[in-house]
Image: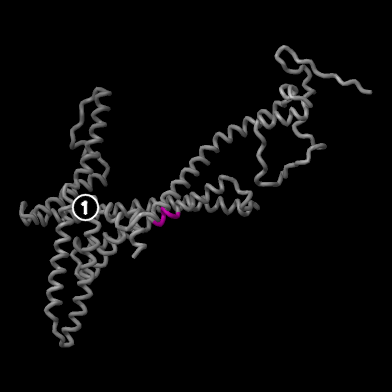
Amino acid sequence: MSHISFPVPNENGRPNEPSFYPPPFDTGSSAFQMNPLSSHPPRTPRASLASNSWGGLGGGGHASMFTQPHDVHGHAQTFAAQDEIQEPEIVRDAEIDEEEESVKEAEKNVARSEVWREMVLTSNGRDKAFKLIQYSIRVYLFFHTGVTASRWLKGNTRPPWEEELVKRLRSAMSGFSFSRKLLLLFNWLAPLTSIMAQQTESLSSSRDKKLSPKPFLHAALYAPPPVLLELVNAFADDLATLARLGLVGKRTGERAERFSDWCWFFSTLAGLVENNLERSVVGNLQQEIESRLYSESMGGATAKSQGSGSKHDHKELSRLQTKDYWLQISRAKLVMDLIFVSYDLFRLRRAKEPVRAFAGLTAAILRNTAIRPIPIVLSGF
């Protein structure tokens, strides 16, 4: 009978013989073996589970305190640290999914009347609604005038009620146009506020560095170009509106209106450039995610063996596709605005009335569609 010697713990409470530590895996008695060719091997148990399993192999509850191998404890700490890194991403994805589900559930319960009420609550919302009505009337009058002209060529006379209807619709269209200009008064306050906020920050930094404060004109000139363009465009729009009210001369109003059209033209071009840049960035991100998902699918990963990273890629790809869709909507609206304003700036005459009518109506529809709740309204029609 062989003699079995047990190690005696030293002063630190650990055994003196390092050979007492058992191997990490008992290949002879273990019923579980990892597949080295698997792309998603099972995770290593945590430190607490590892210590309990080693305690069972040692034959006693107190022996697990002395028989836990050093390398397994290091791997357990490594995977615990990985869990700490992955858990915030999982929690963040869960929060995003819950938010999306709550938004979809809220969209089902939102009535169309509530959407329109929230829309016309502000002056910008009323401007969008009035523009939609104005250009709908304009398109109807274009078709109605064409049908009436064909009747007149055939020798049919226009009934009195039809002439009265056309007259009232033209008056309503002009009234909606003037109302929209009144609603957009003092829109220069928004860019002015941002420039003043920038000046306040520069003043505070100048005081800290003991420098002379910079004037407002310096802050305005060093403001971002879109903000500065919006400021001068709003001022020109207000001058044109005041000229229609009779408070400013007619000639001054015409010049201000033409300058406003030039500002609108350049801001639309800047918006198209920015839209193309954003779409290129979104497209590159989509290609990266699609290539990564394709590599995982070619690696033999199934739906059950996909990890949290693959699920996150699927969700991110869906979000990028949605963002690209709305960027396309914004680009189409900007193109319609560019066509509309080009007819005024370059004094184009060919097919002016139908092109401006359809471009204005399309821009109004796309502008309303770009708002998040509006697709609910349009889907109900």
The amino acid at mark 1 is Cys
Q: Image height check: is 6 above or below 369? A: above
Residue 322 sits inside the magenta stretch:
yes
* Residue 341 vs residue 151, the one in the foreground: 151
- Image quadrant assignment for residue 73: top right
Q: Residue 159: image x %, image y %? A: 13, 81
Q: Is residue 174 left or right of residue 95?
A: left
Q: Image height check: is 123 above or below 90? A: below
* Residue 190 vs residue 161, the one in the foreground: 161
Q: Image height check: is 378 above or below 2? A: below
Q: Quadrant of the C terminus?
A: bottom left
Q: Quadrant of the N terminus?
A: top right
Residue where numbered disc 1 is placed: 263
Q: Residue 188: image x %, image y %? A: 19, 45
Query: Residue visible at 24% across and 51% down?
Result: 121
Q: Provide the residue span drawn in magenta.
A: 321-325
Residue 316 sits inside the magenta stretch:
no
